[in-house]
Amino acid sequence: MHKLAMIIATIFSISAPHQLAISHVSTAIVVAPVEAHKNVRKSKIIISVVSLHHLAGKWTKDVLNAARKAHISPLLVASVLHVENRGEINESAHRVSSAGAIGPMQLMPTTAWDDLRVNPWNPRQNIDGGARYLASLLRRFGGHRRLALIAYNAGPSAVAGGARPECAVLYADAVLRYAG
């Protein structure tokens, strides 16, 4: 297990590999001094790390940090980032959608500036804000990931009012296919 932690620490430039703990494929990497569960297989761990990097690309470290601070799954955050950018992560820093959403996590300007207090044009702040926003939606909708993702796409007021736009449902399903 120590060798695997060293490899992962090297891949993600983590300075304290002894603090890495691997819990479950859906949570990818949890940075905390916790013992790994005995029956977690190394192959699943490596697959989850590779999956996280595949989904988040150059933003992997930022996704890990933001997810840790927001107390949510890094794989879920990476999956949102991946779907929001249709897999084209390298061009995501300054992407603006037709609706006006900005950056890797496609935050609406008013949500970013007013609610999250982040600069949506700064990729690190954008990812941090997106993870915190997703965490708040998960809390608001009782941990129901699909509803939280529909709200991330369509807006929480619409979802709280019973709306389930087809495009937002398809979006949530796409994210969940990656996140598991």
Image: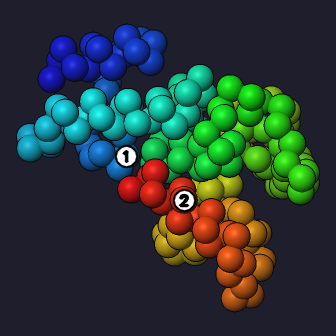
Give left or right: position of 148 versus 126.
Answer: left
Q: Which mark is residue 174?
A: 2
Q: Quadrant of residue 35?
A: top left
Q: Position of residue 29 (x, y in %)?
A: 36, 35
Q: Position of residue 155 (x, y in %)?
A: 76, 69
Give left or right: position of 28 versus 13.
Answer: left
From what the image shows, is residue 81 above or below residue 43? below
Q: Quadrant of residue 122?
A: top right
Residue 134 shows in this picture: yes
Q: Position of residue 62 (x, y in %)?
A: 59, 29
Name the amino acid type tagged 1. Answer: Thr
Q: Position of residue 134 (x, y in %)?
A: 62, 56
Residue at 68% x, 26% y: name it: 90
Extreme residue in the bottom direction? 162
Name the amino acid type tagged 2. Answer: Ala
Residues packed near mark 2 inside 10 Å, few (<14), some (14 to 19) or many (20 plus) = some
Residue 33 shows in this picture: no
Q: Quadrant of residue 69?
A: top right
Residue at 9% x, 44% y: name it: 39
- Say what secondary structure mark 1 lies in: helix
- Say what secondary structure mark 2 lies in: helix
- Which of pointers 2 and 1 lies earlier in the amino acid sequence? 1
Marks 2 and 1 sit apart, C-alpha to C-alpha, by 18 Å
Specify the quadrant that holds the C terminus.
bottom left
Residue at 55% x, 27% y: name it: 57
Give left or right: position of 15 versus 57.
Answer: left
From what the image shows, is residue 127 above or below residue 59? below
Q: Which residue is mark 1?
A: 27
Camera-side mark, 2 or 1: 2
Residue at 37% x, 46% y: name it: 27
Kindly check if marks 2 and 1 are in contact, taking CB atoms under 8 A apart as contact. no
